Image (tube, rainbow, N blue to C red):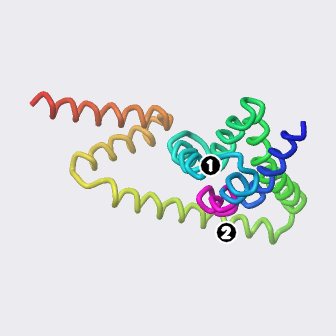
Amino acid sequence: MAEYLKIFISFFKIGLFTFGGGYAMMPFFRQELVEKRKYIKEEELIDFYSIGQCTPGVIAVNVATFTGYKIKGVSGACMATFAIVLPSLIIIMAIAGALTMLSDNEFVKHAFAGIRIGVIALILNEVVNLFKKTVKSKYQVAVFVLIAIVLFGFNLSAVLAVIVAATVGLVKFLRSKWQ
C-alpha cells in the first residue's frame, strides 16, 4: 500500500505542473521518476515519451500509464494515470463551479461573447495556415472542395469526411502505381 501512495504522490505532483503540455513536463518527469524515485531509467523515459507521442491521448497521461505499469502492473498504471489527471480535474471543476456562479453576471456574459469570437478567429487562422501548408496542387484543392461540399452541403459526419478523403487519396495513389 505504501508503494501505491508513493506512486500517487509522485504523479499527483507532476500533474500539478501540466501547464504547457507534455514537453514542458519533461523536467518534472525526469526529476521525479528517474532521479528521485528511480522508478525508470532515462532511456526508458525517452522511450515512453516516444511511444506516448505516437499513441492516442495526452503525452503526460501516456507516460504516467507506461511508468505505472512498469512499477506495479495494471494497478500501478491505473494509480499513476488517476494521480496525474486528478489535479487538472480538480482545477477544471473549480473553474466550472465558479463559472456557473458567475454565468448570470453581465460582465462575464460579454467577456465570453468576446472569447467565443476570438476562438473562432484562432481556429480560422489555424485552418488557413493548415491549408497553405497542405494544399499544394490542383488535385488537393479539388479534394478540399469535395470534402467541404459534402461536409457543409450534406451534413456528413467528420469521421466519414476523413474516410472519404483517405479513400480519394488511396485511389489516386493506386492509380499512379498502375500507370
Instruction: Select label 1 or label 2 by which is in front.
Output: 1
The residue tagged 2 is 114
Asked if residue 144 lies left or right of residue 161, the reply is left
Instruction: Identify the residue at image location x=59%, y=52%.
Output: 42
Which one is in front, 103 or 25? 25
Disc 1 marks a residue whose amino acid type is Lys
Report the residue at 50% width, 34% height from top.
157
Question: Secondary structure under badge 2?
Answer: helix
Q: Percent x, y for residue 140?
A: 27, 47
The outermost residue toward the left is 179
Q: Quadrant of the N terminus?
A: top right
In the rendering, at what x and y percent does residue 14 appear?
Answer: 75, 56
Callout 1: SS: loop
Is residue 153 located in the magenta-colored stretch of the structure?
A: no
In the rendered image, the residue lying farthest to the bottom is: 107
Q: Would you call the spot at circle 2 few (<14 residues within 10 Å), some (14-19), or many (20 or more)?
A: few
As drawn, is 54 to the left or to the right of 13? left
- Identified at 15% across, 34% down, the residue is 176
Residue at left 54%, top 64%?
122
User: Measured from the top left, where is residue 160 in percent x and y?
Assistant: 45, 32
What residue span does the magenta drawing correspond to? 19-29
Instruction: Give the mark, 1 or 2, whose residue is nearer the N terminus.
Output: 1
To which quarter of the image does residue 47 belong?
A: top right
The tag on residue 41 is: 1
Q: Residues within 10 Å of mark 1 (few under 14, many from 20)?
A: few
Which secondary structure is most common in the magenta stretch?
helix
Task: Give residue 50's mark.
Answer: none
